[in-house]
């Protein structure tokens, strides 16, 4: 039974039709799995890429008995795979091979409730009843009751969800966990999830877990293959996961763990206070770590080494200090709001050596080519390293007719947005388009402040429901947007990618500006300098590449099926007037381009009338 026949079987069960791009992808992925190869697959929206790698992965696992790890950037895609796609694929593979492939979902430690923490703190509920509790207190009580009755302790199954501040009351970090010494180890939710993953054939996880793995901490089972969906976001997620943070909350957390182990040393807190005092005078990138900071960190590390070196939290802190104070220049260091940060300058090595080496690796996304080439992505993730062997890049296209389904309007007559955000003229122009489309607008802004100002402006000028990110959980806002085709959703960068809203609900996507990294962003700044030292164009390789991926992702929110139609409106004239504009446009869906406002409004009005009837 070939991979194409199994794919046809799965597609048939959901009433779908064969898509040549999906077939091409599935065959290439299956070959790479069998050959242990490295493959980059750009699969445009509508290709059905999750089935394009799930079917070959499950068939390969069934035939070889090897494990595969599948990683996504977003929870939404994780849910789609675990709840919808994987069960269908498993049944089709079982029908054709007689082998039932087992899957498991594995997340980071803090995504699960800690029963020890829940039981320790539950006695506090007797101090007040639910009627007297604050809103936060009520949510903590509800979360604890849920944890005591949950089968998995997975935060995603707590509906409605709770804010991070509440979740922290019933969870712990990996460093805070007692591990095998915990009296509730046999009931431990994260430990049970890891046991299930060890027994599974296909482990579904996220890029943050790959980040942990890339730091040489074994959190994933040994596997013969890794498949990375939403691979355009891998470098950013791994960088975030490997970023070190030392501030008052982190120092207090370590002190609390030292106290619980009976080893709290007042010297640790004294040097911690000295560090925080020094950080009050610091803000922004630190090219040379000041003596007071260096001495305080060194003294804190020595204190931990002397009092509790064998504890996991002590080992982690000591390693972080070593990285921050390293003279090798591998970390970018900066301070912000009395907190010290350090991020790796380059994550290509850790990704290549700890995640891709000696196994098949498949990376896929709708946006892997940058400026028409796979090379930038291959270099960023380390596939281009000589010791990684050859890699292949392929684009299987999209079933969409972009030029007929979508219009790309660029407001070329308006000045490019400045540092203070969009002008009133630009906001008025956005209002014109929202009125013409009668809502159904996904408005994407590069800053939270910009989104909040725009949402307030829209509420004053249009009689439509306006939702703004931050007012509720993102999943709740997206569901509200999907369920009312006159609602508009205004948000920031987390909405630029990973959300799927097919149909009439999203017929207008507004992009406020080209999302270059902030000029004072320490990591982008340092990476740009590094490229320049090597003789490259730092702006193009760092800032323009970052912006190109996000512009492609944002404009890709409009058309999610072959029946969708609408407008992407970009309020940044630099997309047409600057030399890098062509580089950015090359990665965006090839919709019909126009600078004509009246034509764009008429198209939206016609679309609103047609779809309302």
Image (cartoon, grey):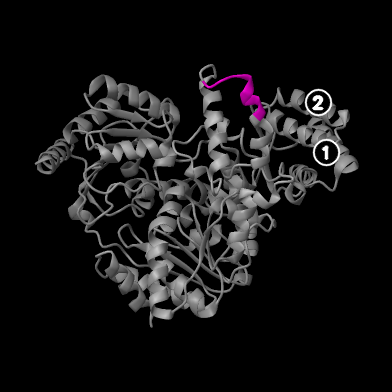
Q: Residue at point 59% right, 66% down?
A: 199
Mark 2: few/some/many CA within 10 Å (<14, 14-19, 20+): some
Residue occupying the far bottom of the picture: 1
What label sits on residue 363 in the rendered view?
A: none
The one nearer the camera, 187 or 484, is 187
Q: Is residue 531 left or right of residue 543?
A: right
Dividing the picture into quadrants, the one containing residue 353 is bottom right
Q: Is residue 519 placed above or below 33 in the rendered structure?
A: above
**Residue 400 percent location from the top left of the image:** 24, 59
**Residue 256 percent location from the top left of the image:** 76, 32
The one nearer the camera, 146 or 594, is 146
| Mark 1 vs mark 2: in front | 1
Q: Is residue 388 placed above or below 197 in the rendered structure?
A: below
**Residue 26 percent location from the top left of the image:** 39, 72
- By secondary structure, the bulk of the magenta-drawn segment is best described as helix
Q: Are marks 1 and 2 in contact (CB under 8 Å)?
A: no
SS category of the residue bearing label 1: loop
What label sits on residue 261 in the rendered view?
A: 1
Q: Is residue 328 left or right of residue 153?
A: right
The one nearer the camera, 73 or 601, is 73
Q: Mark 1 vs mark 2: which is more N-terminal?
A: 1
How far separated are the C-alphas under marks 1 and 2?
24 Å
Q: Residue at point 62% right, 57% down?
A: 194
Q: Residue at point 58% right, 45% down?
A: 112
The one nearer the camera, 209 or 95, is 95
Quickly name the residue at label 2.
274
Mark 1: few/some/many CA within 10 Å (<14, 14-19, 20+): few
Q: Residue at point 43% right, 39% down?
A: 493
> Where, quadrant-wise, is the C terminus in this rendering?
top left
Question: Which residues are the magenta region?
Answer: 123-130
Residue occupying the far right of the picture: 306
């Amino acid at each position: 039974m070939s991979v194409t026949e199994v794919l046809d079987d799965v597609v048939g069960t959901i009433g779908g039709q064969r898509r040549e791009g999906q077939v091409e992808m599935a065959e290439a992925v299956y070959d790479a799995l069998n050959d242990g190869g490295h493959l980059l697959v750009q699969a445009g929206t509508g290709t059905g890429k999750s089935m394009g790698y799930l079917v070959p992965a499950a068939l390969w696992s069934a035939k070889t008995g090897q494990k595969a790890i599948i990683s996504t950037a977003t929870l939404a895609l994780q849910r789609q795979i675990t709840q919808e796609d994987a069960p269908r694929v498993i049944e089709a593979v079982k029908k054709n091979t007689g082998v039932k492939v087992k899957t498991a979902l594995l997340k980071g430690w803090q995504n699960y409730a800690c029963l020890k923490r829940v039981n320790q703190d539950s006695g506090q509920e007797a101090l007040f009843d639910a009627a007297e509790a604050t809103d936060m207190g009520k949510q903590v009580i509800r979360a604890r009751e849920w944890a005591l009755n949950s089968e998995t302790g997975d935060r995603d199954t707590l509906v409605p969800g709770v804010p991070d501040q509440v979740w922290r009351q019933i969870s712990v970090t990996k460093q805070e966990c007692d591990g095998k010494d915990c009296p509730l180890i046999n009931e431990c939710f994260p430990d049970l999830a890891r046991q299930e993953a060890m027994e599974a054939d296909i482990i579904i996880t996220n890029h943050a877990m790959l980040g942990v793995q890339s730091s040489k901490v074994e959190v994933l089972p040994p596997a013969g293959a890794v498949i990375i969906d939403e691979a355009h976001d891998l470098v950013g997620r791994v960088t975030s996961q490997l970023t070190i943070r030392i501030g008052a909350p982190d120092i207090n957390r370590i002190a609390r763990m030292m106290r619980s182990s009976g080893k709290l040393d007042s010297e640790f807190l004294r040097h911690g206070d000295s560090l925080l005092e020094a950080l009050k005078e610091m803000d922004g990138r630190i090219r040379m770590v000041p003596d007071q900071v260096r001495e305080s960190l060194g003294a804190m590390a020595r204190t931990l080494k002397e009092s509790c070196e064998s504890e996991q939290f002590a080992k982690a802190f000591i390693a972080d200090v070593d990285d921050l104070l390293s003279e090798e220049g591998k970390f970018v260091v900066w301070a912000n709001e009395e907190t010290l940060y350090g991020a790796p300058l380059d994550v290509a090595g850790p990704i290549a050596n700890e995640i891709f080496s000696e196994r098949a690796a498949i990376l896929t996304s709708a946006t892997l080519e940058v400026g028409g080439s796979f090379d930038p992505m291959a270099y960023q993730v380390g596939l281009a390293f000589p010791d990684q062997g050859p890699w292949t890049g392929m684009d299987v296209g999209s079933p969409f007719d972009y030029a007929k389904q979508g219009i790309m309007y660029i407001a070329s007559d308006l000045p490019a947005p400045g540092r203070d955000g969009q002008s009133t003229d630009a906001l008025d122009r956005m209002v014109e388009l929202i009125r013409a489309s009668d809502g159904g607008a996904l408005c994407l802004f590069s800053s939270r402040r910009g989104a909040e100002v725009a949402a307030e402006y829209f509420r004053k000028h249009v009689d439509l429901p306006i939702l703004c990110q931050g007012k509720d959980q993102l999943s709740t806002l997206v569901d509200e947007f999907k369920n009312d085709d006159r609602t508009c959703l205004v948000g920031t960068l987390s909405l630029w990618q990973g959300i799927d809203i097919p149909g009439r609900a999203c017929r207008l996507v507004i992009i406020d500006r080209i999302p270059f990294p902030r000029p004072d962003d320490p990591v982008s700044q340092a990476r740009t300098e590094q490229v320049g030292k090597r003789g490259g164009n730092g702006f193009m390789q760092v800032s323009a590449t970052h912006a190109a991926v996000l512009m492609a992702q944002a404009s890709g929110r409009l058309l999610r099926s072959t029946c969708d139609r609408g407008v992407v409106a970009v309020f940044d004239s630099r997309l047409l007037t600057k030399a890098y504009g062509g580089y950015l446009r090359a990665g965006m869906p090839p919709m019909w381009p126009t600078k004509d406002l009246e034509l764009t409004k008429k198209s939206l009005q016609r679309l609103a009338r047609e779809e309302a009837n």
